[in-house]
Amino acid sequence: MKAIEITNLLLHLGRLLSAGSSNTGLSRNQWLALRFFAYANSCSRNVGCFSAHQSTSQGTASQIIKHLVEEEYLEQQPARYDGRSSIFNLTDKGKDVIAHDPLETFFREVEALEDADLQNLEHALRVFIKHFRRKSGGAGVCANCNWVSKRRFGNRDVPSHLNFYCKYFEVDVPDDDAGLLCSWFSSKS
Ligand code: SF4
């Protein structure tokens, strides 16, 4: 049956992708956590979003993060969106692991796909993730989010600049956050 075959392929791919952690000196869960904090935006780089993303308990998520902080892969900072909360950012040591991402060869394989195949693959993966995480469409970026309001600034003298405003958090989204994954993302479709 095709569905079982495809599901088994996805499981196999998942195992192959997570096996990349063995080159980093981190356990599989620590490596997945570091990747989450490298690619999540600042609204999402917290214990709650990480535990939801990994479908794990807050206690387990806290333990993994604590280890990464103690080993100086992550550092804790006050959250910009909520002064009572903390977010976790990569240190230089953490960035160095991500800069030598063992998935680099896989990225190149994905990039080599035709545009139409890429779009179909992305759509199919989003549908699957949405099925398992019904509260949202999974993670996504501001440009495709239901909560975003886009504002364009500029005039003849100043080049135009597209600014994202998040209606969920009621804040402007900094430029360096706009392309990162957000756990609060809500799909427009
Ligand atoms: S607009 Fe959407 S994706 Fe962007 S920060 Fe807000 S909730 Fe997250």
Image: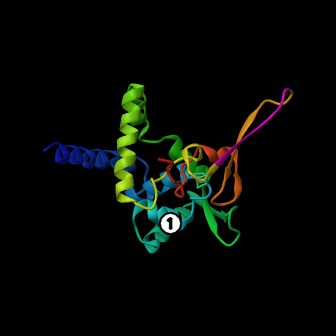
Q: Secondary structure at mark 1?
A: helix
- Type of colouring: rainbow
**Number of callouts in the render?**
1
In the image, what residue type sits under mark 1? His
Q: Is residue 20 visible?
A: no
Q: Where is the N terminus found, in terms of image quarters?
A: top left
Q: Position of residue 75 (x, y in %)?
A: 62, 61
| In magenta segment, residue 115 | no
Q: Position of residue 179 (x, y in %)?
A: 59, 43
Residue situated furthest right in the rendering: 157
Residue pictured at 35% horizontal, 58% vertical = 132
Residue situated furthest left in the rendering: 1
Which residues make up the magenta segment? 149-156
Q: Is residue 54 visible?
A: yes
Mark 1 CB near ligand 1 (8 Å cut) = no
Prevailing secondary structure of the magenta residues: strand
Does residue 24 lie above or below 160 as drawn?
A: below
Q: Position of residue 94 (x, y in %)?
A: 55, 51
Does residue 187 lie above or below 118 as drawn?
A: below
- Quadrant of the image occupied by residue 56: bottom left
167 and 76: which one is in front?
A: 167
20 and 133: which one is in front?
A: 133
| In magenta segment, residue 153 | yes
Q: Position of residue 155 (x, y in %)?
A: 83, 31
- Quadrant of the image occupied by residue 122: top left
Q: Which residue is mark 1?
A: 67
In the rendered structure, the answer to whether residue 160 lies left or right of residue 59 reads: right
Does residue 141 lie above or below 184 as drawn?
A: above
In the rendered structure, the answer to whether residue 155 lies left or right of residue 37 reads: right
How busy is the neighbourhood of tag 1: few (under 14 within 10 Å), some, or many (20 plus)? few
Residue situated furthest front in the rendering: 189
